Image (tube, rainbow, N blue to C red):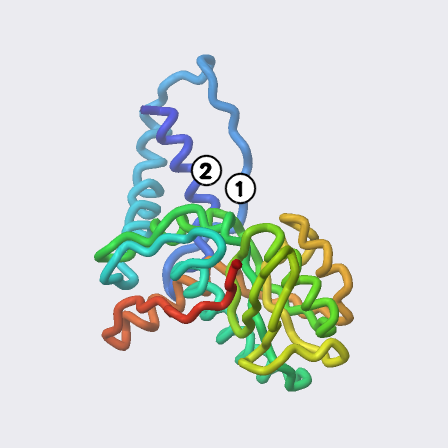
Amino acid sequence: MRHHHFILLLLAFAVISCQSPGKPTLSFARQIPIDSTVASDSSISATIAPLRDSVEAIMNEVIGSSPKEIFSEKPESPLSSFVADLLKETAVEELNESGKEALPVITVINIRGLRAPLPKGVIKVKDIYALMPFENQMIILKMSGKDIKSLYQHMGESGGDGLSGGSFTFNNQSVKNPEINNKPLKEDAFYYVVTSDYLATGGDHYNIFANAVEKHESSNKIRDLIIQHIRELNAQGKQIQTPSNQRIKMQ
């Protein structure tokens, strides 16, 4: 049991970037080795108890609901499209507020980074931590149409990934009919690509992002944005509804 208490204490120090205003926050953490030399201490247990209860209350907060279980799989899926769409919407607002150049926007997320489905029924904070256990930051890159076609090529070769605002067909190992906002991709034009800091730095072999001519680092964490979006839907009396339009056609 003392092992569980120490784990909960460490978890408390990570708590929780998605908290609403007014909830307590902790701003540091340190690693405590746990082995057979650590003796049980009732005073430590008493100290940990309120932290454990606080963490459990935060993680078990109901933030929304879904009419069905929502999975993520390649080449695309309702879950990856849902997450990509909400990131695109957030990025467009952020770009407008920052006075950035008005350009078409797409979002690319890695499906392997979505580690668990959203359950049917109530959605809790802990479900979003299971879905995305990483502290990924939202990044906005300005890229040429030529490089975005190469980006689509990589997505096709890797079996697909989450995409919003764009579409293409992948046939005979080649990109066909690349589009952004339902218009043909122009190789000599520029666009914004919303993604994670993991992919933006070459994760999952997305090396093409190194060609970006401009980079905007958002202060938002992707997991927090998912939680915020589901909370907003719930406040409007809406359940999670996933998009059904096809973005990547694998032939």
The mark found on residue 198 in the picture is: none
Mark 1 lies on residue: 29
Looking at the image, residue 51 lies above or below residue 16: above
From the top left corner, tell me how far across and down residue 165 is, in percent.
53, 74
Tell me if 194 is positioned left or right of 67 in this view. right
From the top left corner, tell me how far across and down residue 151 is, in percent.
67, 62
Residue type at tag 2: Leu
Q: Quadrant of residue 246?
A: bottom left
Which residue is at a point 28% across and 63% down the rendered structure image?
A: 64
| Mark 1 neighbour density, 10 Å: few (under 14) some (14–19) many (20 or more) | few
Q: Which of pointers 2 and 1 lies earlier in the amino acid sequence? A: 2
The mark found on residue 10 in the picture is: 2
Q: Mark 2–mark 1 contact, CB under 8 Å?
A: yes
Residue type at tag 1: Ala
Which residue is at a point 49% across and 65% down the rendered structure image?
A: 84
Q: Is residue 246 visible?
A: yes
Per the image, label 1 sits on a secondary structure element best described as loop
Which residue is at a point 39% across and 47% down the rendered structure image?
A: 116
* Distance in Å between CA atoms under marks 2 and 1: 7 Å
Which residue is at a point 58% across and 61% down the rendered structure image?
A: 170
Tell me if 176 is positioned left or right of 20 in this view. right
